[in-house]
Amino acid sequence: MKITLEIPDNKAAFMMELLQSLPFVKATPARTKSKPQDETEYLLSNPANARELLESIEQIRQGQTVQMKELD
C-alpha cells in the first residue's frame, strides 16, 4: 500500500523523522513538489473572497482603516 501525505514545509523534517522511526514505515520525500499556493491567489480564486479582498484594499487606499489593540 502506498500513502501520500502533504505536509507543510515547516513540519516536513519533524514528520520525516517521526515516520522513519517507525519500523514498519518506509518514508521517502516526494520527488516532485507542487508550488505552494499564495494566500492572495487563494482568496482571489473564489468570487466572494475576491470581492471582500478587493473591497478591503480599496478601504485601505481611502484611509478607512481601524487600528486594533494588539492582544498580549
Image: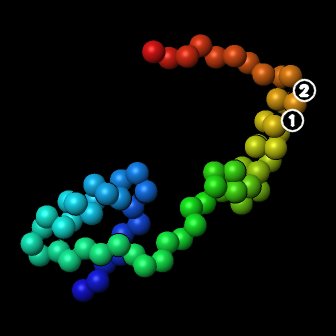
- Residue 29 shows in this picture: yes
- Apparent side of residue 28 relative to residue 72 in the rendered image (left or right): left
Point out the residue furthest to the left here: 23
Kind of residue at disc 2? Gln
What residue does disc 1 label? 58
Q: Position of residue 43 (x, y in %)?
A: 69, 52
**Gap between marks 2 and 1, in whole Å?**
6 Å
Instruction: Please tell me whether mark 2 sits on a helix, a strand or a loop.
Output: loop
| For residue 53, above or below residue 44 | above
Point out the residue furthest to the right here: 62
Kind of residue at disc 1? Glu
**Label 1: how many Cα within 10 Å (few below 14, some 14–19, many 20+):** few
| For residue 34, above or below residue 36 | below
Q: Are marks 2 and 1 in contact (CB under 8 Å)?
A: yes
Point out the residue furthest to the bottom here: 1
Instruction: Please tell me whether mark 1 sits on a helix, a strand or a loop.
Output: helix
Q: Position of residue 24 (x, y in %)?
A: 11, 75
- Residue 62: which numbered mark, if any? 2
Residue at horizontal 43%, vertical 57%? 8
- Classify the position of the C terminus by image quarter: top left
Q: Nearer the viewer, residue 32 or 57?
A: 32
Residue at horizontal 70%, vertical 56%? 41
- Displayed quadrant of residue 38: bottom right
Residue at horizontal 59%, vertical 13%? 69
